[in-house]
Image (cartoon, rainbow, N blue to C red):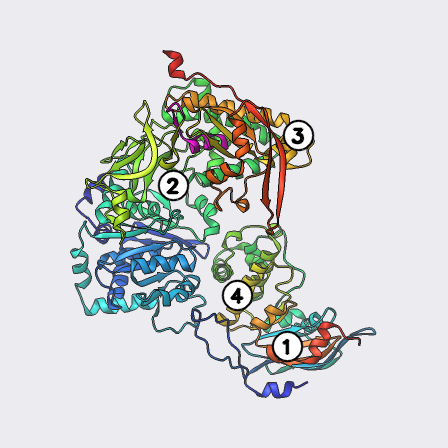
Amino acid sequence: MNDVSVDQAPMTSELSTDQSGGPVTGPRLFNEVLLEVNNVSLSFGGVKALSDISFDIKKGEVRAIIGPNGAGKSSMLNCINGFYHPQEGTITYKGKERRQMRPHEAAKTGIARTFQNIALFRGMSTLDNIMTGRLLKMKSNLFWQALYWGPNLKEENEHREKVEHIIDFLEIQDIRKTPVGRLPYGLQKRVELGRALAMEPELLLLDEPMAGMNVEEKEDMCRFVLDVNDQFGTTIALIEHDMGVVMDISDRVVVLDYGRKLADGTPDEVRSNQDVIDAYLGVSH
Amino acid sequence: MSETQDTKHLDTFPKLLQHHAKVRPTKPAMREKNFGIWQTWSWAYCAEEVAALACGLAAKGLKRGERIAIIGDNRPRLYWTMCAAQAIGAIPVPLYQDSVADEMAFVLDHAETRFAMAEDQEQVDKLLEIMDRCPRLERIIYDDDRGMRHYKQPFLDSYDSLTAEGRAFRSENPGFYEAEVAKGKGSDVAIFCYTSGTTGEPKGVVLSCDNVLITARNAAELEGLSEEEDLLAYLPMAWVGDHIFSYAQAYVVGFGVSCPESGATVMHDLRELGPTYFFAPPRIFENILTNVMVRMEDASAPKRRMFKYFLDVAKRCGVDILDGKPVSFSDRLLYNLGEVLVYGPLKNVLGLTRVQLAYTAGEAIGPDIFDFYRSLGVNLKQLYGSTEASVFITIQPNGEIFANTVGKPAPDVEVRIADNGEVQFRSPGVFREYYKNDEATRNTKTEDGWVMTGDAGFFDDRAHLRIIDRAKDVGKLADGTLFAPKFIENKLKFFPNIREAVVFGDGRDYAAAFINIDQQALGSWAERNNVAYASYQELASHPRVGEIIKEHVVQVNRDLSQDSHLAGSQLKRFLILHKELDPDDGELTRTRKVRRRIIAERYEPLIDALYSDRDRASIHVEITYEDGRKGVIAGEVSIYDSEIYQPVKAAAE
């Protein structure tokens, strides 16, 4: 593991640039650490899901977590947003160490996520689903919200405007009023991303945002992820299986296998790491 | 109506804009749905915005007579750019927003554009890609700045920075803008419209302000358009129709134009807006109707029965009521009940409640579809037009609407039929030239201003123009009878059971047809009627399918016999092809147009059989699978005889 040397060097990577056309980009530099995972271990009974994992996520970067099935990727995300509580180790977020945090507390501190299997309200419209993402930002209580009058009307309008910007951003205007259950899978994923964005998170956790998508949907999703990162400055940690996608859009990659950390570094470094190659091609453990 | 008279002396778009800003400053000029809400801009606001934009373009160096490309969906800012360019004497060249970079490169290079206005990152990327092939292109302005943060090219400007620069320029050079607008005159070039170019390279049609404005004004007067109209601008800006309906007529009459939120929300926005003036190609009317019918299939049985009953009522008397013809009291009562129960709600869902005038053009519309909308009380009319005419050549006058004609010549338009049957016209809207293509100009436009359309047609007994085919496809039977294959093919294809048809007859004794069945339509018929079949080929050769198709052919013959010009080209024999015509085999173009010559070669034995007295023929054809492998389909095909009707005229004599 040579992550120490990697961490010391300033991170450089480029946004997608195709020949002469395309944006003029410089190297991307990240210094400030947003979240730090130190020696985290998690086990369910006798099963060790994570053992002694350490890595960090820097403010503004796109960080990928990859690994074969059962490597502990989702468990890692669940630890970060407080759904699981690791038995050992610490997670430091924005300089504050925390051990026992509940998901809604994590959400309040600016961590949002999407799920591997879509977790939307199927009977509700796209608009309403994304509105639920604003819930934590709303000041008035249920009673006042139901009244829909005076200051609450104004508040709702403000939230609606934020949501409309997200709808515009994700180009889903045409399904604004469509019940989510009627939408194809790729669009549902996009709505879920929209709901996470509605929280205006600082750290966005995406659990397999491109699973089960066709090439075109994947390209769209990649663009949205990069745009979110670029325009809102949101830090993104994502789990993804499509290596092409991971290598294209992430600044740094951490590789897990059987609950252990195999490698950590830029896509190029990870790609040429022998341990990673072995893990993906299958070597007996 | 008076409005068009008031503005008659105003011969350019910017002058009209100034006029409206004075006369109706607070009335809406443009709307766009954005962030889920309709945003509105008044005429006064538009005039200021256009002035700032024009000054910005001038400050960046756009000069009188130069071209500026405009690329994007229908957006208010792009329409303003068009007017701003015209204000300083530059010529807007709108491009199809979905054209690929190569097609764009041709037009940009041909029109020698120095400036380009792009809607968003996607269009900017395309422009950057072809920049080295268009050496004259110097400056790109973009509207939507999403994703543009990292573009640092010095020749890129955002719309906002351009208008800011324009405002500064305007305060430093007071009177500049007004003077520039005053310099404009009606004979100035208003726009280059590049025709899509199905044959060869696209051609740049040069239209002057007079061409566009006089034609737009004439049609607006004929139809009595008022400043209260609402129109949804959703067809490509590069298409001359959008230029006339959404831009020229709006400026002439002073009505508001609305832009949809995105291409995918058009139907929804249409419903919300409820336009009073509407244009759509036949394809869109067809799609809407199909959607309605499919959704009705899912409705509950009582609703379905009610829908069907009142649709029959509408079919019986709806068109007559719309045309103001006498209708029995009971029918009128039923129709009014239907309006409350079915037609009204249906029109509301489709966004057609307030439509006073709807046009369709571009290709033949199925008479059933046409009558469906008219029977609901939607004043749908056909028109015939072309880019070279600034759209209007003929329009169906109110009260004289027939599904099979395109109406009478529009005001100030002369139409004549050449000896070879080709339709020619002369009008104030006749284009000046094809840009940098004298040969094409000479081939299309005569010295004295007549334009050849390339369409064959004739005036019927009611003095209505009927377009039957492209002139080059029209032939003659051996006895000299007029023969228009596409006209007959279209008639056949209006039956849902017939997917494709190819009609032969040029230089032959009689007309005969190949028919491709529609597997979906006939497949569901087979399911309902317990007809077993294993493959397309088996279904196509089923005798009961043959009977169904024969009924359709006989129906077409009956229609043809009503028509004194075409009665001679009734279909005497036909066959049902054992395989679908396929673009992969080169039998159709990618846009599903029949390639007559190739089909004639491939199926020569079948054509021979059609013109013999045999009732069966066998055929081997090579086919190409999607992965490129080849195979052979062999089959035995039955040939059917159809009944021929005496021409109505001849029978009456």
Q: Calculate the distance from the C-alpha at mark 3 to the C-alpha at mark 4.
A: 48 Å
User: Label for residue B528?
Assistant: 3
Q: Is disc 4 in the same subunit as disc 1?
A: yes
Residue beneath the point at 49% across and 80% down? A27
Q: Earlier in the sequence, mark 2 or mark 3?
A: 2
Q: Could you say where residue B426 lies in the image, as x and y percent from the top left?
A: 23, 38
**Amino acid on which disc 3 is placed:** Arg
Categorize mark 3 by other alpha carbons within 10 Å: few (<14), some (14-19), many (20+): few
Residue beneath the point at 66% across and 86% down? A2
Q: Calculate the distance from the C-alpha at mark 4 to the C-alpha at mark 1.
A: 22 Å
Query: Which secondary structure lies at badge 3?
Result: helix
Query: Which secondary structure lies at badge 1?
Result: helix
Please identify, in this view, whether the residue under mark 2 or under mark 3 is nearer the observer. Answer: 3
Question: Between B363 and A62, which is closer to the camera in this rendering?
Answer: B363
Q: Could you say where residue B266 lies in the image, as x and y percent from the top left?
A: 45, 48
User: Which residue has dot 2 on it?
Assistant: B278
User: Which residue has dot 1 on it?
Assistant: A271
Q: Could you say where residue A134 lies in the image, as x and y percent from the top left?
A: 55, 63
Query: Which secondary structure lies at badge 4?
Result: helix
Categorize mark 1 by other alpha carbons within 10 Å: few (<14), some (14-19), many (20+): some
**Amino acid on which disc 4 is placed:** Arg
User: Which residue has dot 4 on it?
Assistant: A223
| A240 sits left or right of B45 in the view | right
User: Label for residue B22?
Assistant: none
Please identify, in this view, whether the residue under mark 1 or under mark 2 is nearer the observer. Answer: 1
Q: What is the chain letter for disc 4?
A: A
Please identify, in this view, whether the residue under mark 4 or under mark 1 is nearer the observer. Answer: 1
